[in-house]
Every structure is written in structure tokens, then in C-alpha cells.
Image (cartoon, grey):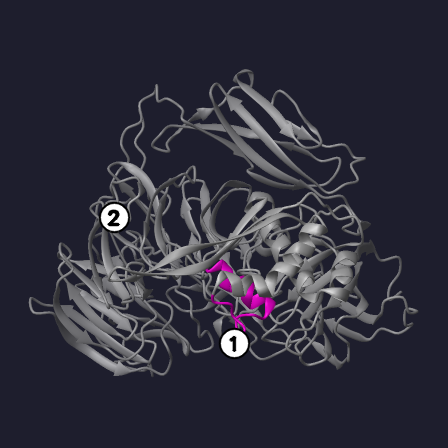
Amino acid sequence: MTRSLILSTIVMSWTLSTSLVTADDFDWTYWRGPQMNGHSTLKNLPAEWNPKGGEGSNVVWKREDLGTRSTPVVMNGKLYMLCRDAAGTSQDGEKVVCLDAHTGETLWENKFNVYLSDVPAERVGWSNVSADPTTGDVFALGVCGLFQCINGETGETKWSHSMHEEYGLLSTYGGRTNFPIIHENNVIVSAIIIGWGEMAKPNHRFIAFDKRNGQPVWFTGTRALPDDTTYSGPVLTTFNGEAALVSGGGDGAVHAFQPRTGKLLWTYNVSGRGLNTTPLVVDNRVYCGHGEENLDDTKMGAVFCVDGTLEGDITKSGEIWRTKEVFLGRSAPLMIDDRLYVIDDRAKMHILNPESGEEIALQRLGTAQRSSPLYADGKIYAATADKRWYTLKPTEDGVEVLHKMRLNGESHGSPIAAAGHVYIPLTSGLYCIGNADAEVSGDPIPEIAEEADRTTDATPTHVQVVPCESLLRPGNRQPFQVRLYDAAGQYVRLAKADEVEFSVDGPGSISEDGAYSISANQSEHAAVIVTAKVGDLSGTARARVVPDLNWSFDFNNGEIPVTWVGANYRHVPLDFDLIESLKADDPLASQLYIFLMTTFVNSGRDASTYDDSTPRQTWNALLAFLGLDASGQKPKTVDEAKEKLQAALDRLIEEKILASAEWSTWQRDLGEGNTVDEIRLSVTRGERKIDGNGVMTKIKTIPKGARSQGWMGHPDLANYTIQADVYGAEKDSKQPDIGLVGQRYTLDMMGASQQLQIRTWTPQLRMANTVPFEWQPNTWYTMKFQTAVEDGSAVLRGKVWKKGEEEPADWTVTATDSPGEHQGSPGLFGNAKDAEIFYDNLTVTANESTGD
């Protein structure tokens, strides 16, 4: 019989003995601390400090060259932190730094580029690293999606994943990047993921990797099409003896998952926008908040408490209390002596009764809050985004201000207590403070809630196939392991080979012992589903088989390769000959064809209804796309709608794009017994497939994806040329941006500025080259982008010419990045917010010689 501590890989177990305790016994390996609640057991910590340093300042050391947004962690006398590197230079990027926690001396740096990202340079270093006492490794997720396991002693990268190229991680202008968290042998990260196959739609997804080798173990999602990226840090806990990972989601909900299996335990829906606040769990209760509109009314912001012991949708059943109009949108709550301390987005500290949410006291700290407070040695340490510092002491009436001052930097990362000191990250630098000659001491870390005992005859209820995701080449062999878990998410055992029945959907075969193999002659890009059946239970794993170069795609088969990451939902195959034929005599029918086919393809259904009876307002979206939503244009009755649209619908029925189109009404409730009839259009798909020139289309109104990237294959490819015919439509005198991606660089035909640009990092053009380039809408062009590694540098060359004309001998634009990125998946970039983009005749070929 075994007992497992949920935080066994986070908290080092030790027995306090004053004569033997050293500063290195007090580690802080996750950004909210060993108890995941912002508490430290350290004592003899200073109440006052002066960032100028010097005698009497209580500043042990400071590093004003290491300003950051990130929260550091400390393990074995070393401090680890993310921050920006070489700001404002051609080498501008991100790095993980390792310092001696006692002296501030740099021990090593792990530097890496920010590539294919919209994050502003000022928001680099958003995430926090996590440290693993078991292996000594640290885990870091960069703002562009580069996820690394780094040797904590040497700084060497042990394994890594380019999360956007491999899985479809979204790296946006907001910069919000989540935090890795370690549970046993899993390290778990999350992000908005726009992947492939059933994961093609945007979704805030969580993925667990085996921390030892980087293999993906499980992949799970929340509600599709969330409005926001998020940086709500997950926390580990137990509910009634069952291990759980709790996190806010980009879909406006708090979710709890089993950390070993990814099984969803419960969901609490509270806001229409993403939750950035990190939850606090105390005695089976979850305290959290948000700063957006509540789902049940128009009031903004809330702090709330829910019962974590329930299952399923606990939106109504699990809510214990919710206090609205408290904008707890960023800073994590603290629980101290049965009082809940929350700092809202306007830097007001609310002290609440945790049983009811009733306010006990209020303390104004500043005007803007981003970081989370620390509680240590009987004091609350808090810093604001408007450069104010407070040391506070909880009192019966509220808090006593022990020390306050102005800072010379903003606070985004949070203060921590470790190794006998307090570490304070600011945008102006990193500060270590402590009382001079103070003896290092502290109380034992409180007992962590244990999981319930698992009996030796636990019944398996869950089958896990590992790795859950694979990217393979023809001729590869991939062994799979089948793990069994009980209903509480506890590991039972490995399945025996003779009790597993494997099957494969797709090319290739699998042996009785679970080794999948694919022929070296496989020439097509293919999706594979491996199923492992154990008795009445089954589990699946997915794989993409992507051959080595050369590739060619013309879309005449009406399909976009299912293996492309971030492409299928955001693009649809259409018949360009039909588009042009319709445009010639019925432009509205042409536009209607584009819009309706996008709905059919992305919904996976052959019937669609357009009305405004739900928040999606699909009827209004249809009118907006057709340019009929303006005042004086928008139909108000079914008869008016028929007058504008029926002829175009009849044409699509004649072309067998539609089988039927029916008009009806629904009643909108105006209150007080009053209703009004509103328009509803229902259409069914016809039998016609693409029988002309197939193209891949990005539509301007695609939800959560009009401006996006997609990737086609292995992230280790290099020295290749990607070429495609491209066509940009025009709407309201505006043109789209059309791009090709190669080796982590973008060649972009920019519509509004009429330029051609090579870049790797959109807001920070550290190595970019931009040249004037006039191009016409509604005209086919050929784009060609060559990437190469020459003399240790990335060398990029691009050209564009009208389709059908002779290819120019010279490159239109070139750029060099030293040392730059030496590998990366081919892909596409498109900004269709202003007008549609069409791709055709896409090829990716290995370079025959340099600069050809």
C-alpha cells in the first residue's frame, strides 16, 4: 500500500533542526511557493529596504541589468528567472538566467530567439520558470512558445519543443504566457492551441510532458473558441483525497483536472473573457477572481469561492459565494488566519470574510496591480505596477503599514522568500533583501493534503497511450506504452502485452507489443490514430506522418492536409473557377458561396442556421461579411431579406452548392410580455464538390483566426524553398497581408503598406528587411521564399512576381540573421482581417545550391 503526496515533486520534505538548517533548505521552486499559496515559513525577514542599496538598506545584492516581468524561483542555492536579453540590439531575445542566490553572481545563461511571435519586446519574459528538486532541472516556456527542459547546474537544454510549430500554440500581442508546473514525472503547460485534426479549432488546452524525455503524455482542452489567452497559473491540490490541478481558462472558467490523466473533474463558468488570476485552494474551497464581465449580468469583475469537491459543471451547484465589482483580474489571493486578502486591478487590497465574501477592511496601495503578494514572517510584501512598495502587518481591523515607498520600476513578477532572503523582481532590476547577520530560521512547511490510499486491487477505469502525440517520418518506428489508472486518477499499472488489443486508423501497422511502424515508401502526409483496447476500456494516441522534402499541394482534391498545424479551421478549400464564374454575373452569390462553405467545412455539418438568437449572432455575421449590416442596408423582415439574398441563394442551389434554403422567424423577448419577430435562414449543403481549380482560402470573418500562422511539418527542417501562388481580394479598398514561413522567418506581402518584408519577430524588427513593393488586389502572384544556413548565419531570400510571367533573376528582398534560426517548419502567414486570401500550387523543395 502506498501513499502519495500531491506536491511530492514540488516540496522537499525535511525536519526542522535549528542547528542543521541552512538557507538552502528553504527553496521556492514554483512561483506561488512550496504550498502554492504565496506563503513562506521563513523568519527574520526585513520589513524595510531601500532599493538604492548601501549600508542599512537591507539590500543583500541587486542586479539592475536584470529587469523582468517574471517571478524567480530558487532551488539548491540557485535562483532561476526569465528575462529579456540584449534589448534593442540585433540579438534582442529572451533568456533563462541562473544566479547564485546568495551573491547574485551569474552562473549561466540560456539564451534563445523570439521567433514568429506578435509579442511586444517589453513583454518578453512573461512566464515563470519551474524547478524540479527531484532531477535538478528547470522548465521554461518562452513567449514565442519555445518550451525547454534545462539542466539546472549547467544551463544546457536537455530537450525542447517548439510549441507553436509542433502543436499550434498561439503567441499573441498581449504576451500572456502560462507557467509550467511539475507533478511527479509530468511537467504540464497550457496555452491557446490551434492544432490539427479534432484539435484544429482554437482551444485553451493543457498538455503534460514526461519531464524526463519530453514525450507528450496527455492532451486535454476546455471550451472551443475562447476569447483570450491567459496566464492563470495552475495549482496542485487534493479534493477529498483526489489529486487535482486547478487553473483559470481562456474561456472564462475555472477548471480542475486529474494531473496524471488530464481528465476534467469540474468546470465553473463565471466570465465571458479569459481568467488570468491564479486560484487559491484552502480546505477543498477554491478562491479566485476576474476583472471582466460576469456571465449572469453586465457587472464587471468578481471574487468568488467554489466547492472543489463536486464534479461536472459546477457553475450553479458549486458556487458558495461571489462578490461582484471587485476587479480581481491578475493578482492571486492570500489566506491569512481565516481572512482572504485580495488586491484588485486598481491596487486596492480587500480583506474579506472567506465564508461569505463580506468585506472586512479596505487598504489602498496604488492605482494598478499586476503581481501577487507574498506572506512571510508575519508580514505581507506587495508591490504595484505603478511603482509603489508596501510591507503590511495583518491586524484585527485590517492591516498596519510597516513600510511604504516609491520604486524605480514596475512590479509584474511577484516577490518570493527563499534561502533566507526576499527576492523582488521589478522592471528596473532584481533585488535580494535580508536582515544583516540574521540567523536563518523558519517553521516546518505545513503538512500537505494527502491523496487517499489506493488499494492493490484498484480497478482500472482509464487507459492512457503514451506518447499521446507523435510527429513521424516514413520509415520511423514508434513504441507505445499503455498505462492504466483508476477512477481517482491514481496509477494502477502498465497494461500487459497479452491484454492489449491495438489497432491503427491510417497507414502503417502496429505490433502486438505496441510498436507502430510506417513504410519508408510512404509519400503522402497522413494522420494516424492508434487505439489500445484493454477489456472494455480504450485509449488513443495521434500521430502525424510527414515525409521529407520535396512536397507539392494544389488543393484540387478539395482537402487541406490534415497534418498541417493551425491550418484547417482557419482555411477552407474552395473552387476558384466557381468563385470567378459567380463573380462575373452575381457577385453576391460569389461572396455567399465563400461564407457558407466556410461554415459547412468548419462545423462539419451539412446544415447551418443563421440567426441572432445566441451570442454568436450568426445572421449578423453573415450580413457583415456581405456588406449588408450598415444602416439602410440591413434587412429587417424576411421579405426584405429575400429581396436582397434570394436570387443569390437560388443561384447556389442551381449550382448544387446548396440543396435548400428556407426562411423563417424566431421571437425575441423584449420583456413585459412583448416580443418581436426576427429573421432566420436555414440552409443545407448540396452535393457539388470542387470540380474546377481548387484553392485554399482564408476568410476575413473566421472567428479567432483571421490573422494567423500555420505549419506543415518537422521543426528540424532547414535549407529549403517554399513557393506558392497567392491572391489577395479587396474589400472597402483594403487588401490583406499574405506570407510564407520558412525556418522561423516570414516573407510578407503587406497590403496596406505595399511592402515586402522578411522578419522573424513582428513587433521587434531586429533583423528585418523591408522594401517597397506595389501589388494589385484580385490578381494572382507567385511568392518564393528561400531559407538557408550559410557560414553559421541564417540567410533569407524572397521574390514575388505576377503569376504566368517570367520569374525575375534577382531576389526582391534579402536578409541575414547572425547566428539566427537554423531550422524550422515550413508554413503560412496570413492577415485576412481586411479581405480574403487564396493559396494555390504550393511547393516546398530542398535547396539544390546556395542562392539559386
Question: Tag 2: residue type?
Answer: Lys
Residue drawn at the location 37% of the way across and 78% of the way down: 410
Within 10 Å of disc 1 (Cα), the crowding (few <14, some 14-19, many 20+) is few
Q: Residue at x 36, y 83 (%)?
A: 408
> Callout 2: few (<14), some (14-19), or many (20+) C-alpha neighbours within 10 Å?
few
Residue occupying image coordinates x 76% and y 41%: 524
Please tell me whether residue 621 belongs to the stretch shown in magenta. yes
Q: Circle 2 sits in a helix, a strand or a loop, which is it?
A: loop
The total number of labels drawn is 2
Q: Foreground residue, 847 or 622?
A: 622
Which portion, as a residue range, is magenta?
A: 616-636
Q: Vertical placement of 734 versus 116: above or below?
A: below
Determine the secondary structure under disc 1.
Answer: loop
**Disc number at residue 742?**
none
- Residue 538 position, x and y percent, is 50, 26
Could you tell me residue 225's position as x and y percent? Answer: 48, 55
Q: Is residue 793 visible?
A: no
Residue 340 in the image, given as x and y percentages of width and height: 18, 60
Q: Is residue 18 magenta?
A: no
- Horizontal side of residue 847 vs 164, given as left or right: right
Q: Quadrant of the N terminus?
A: top left
Amino acid on which disc 1 is placed:
Gly
The front one of 57 and 537 is 537
- Is 84 situated above or below 9? below
Apparent side of residue 168 relative to residue 48 in the rendered image (left or right): right
- Residue 198 spot, x, y in % from top left: 56, 43
The Cα–Cα distance between marks 2 and 1, rounded to whole angstroms, is 43 Å
Question: Of the numbered discs in the image, which one, if any, rests on residue 632?
Answer: 1
The residue carrying mark 2 is 316
The residue depicted at 87 percent of the width and 64 percent of the height is 850
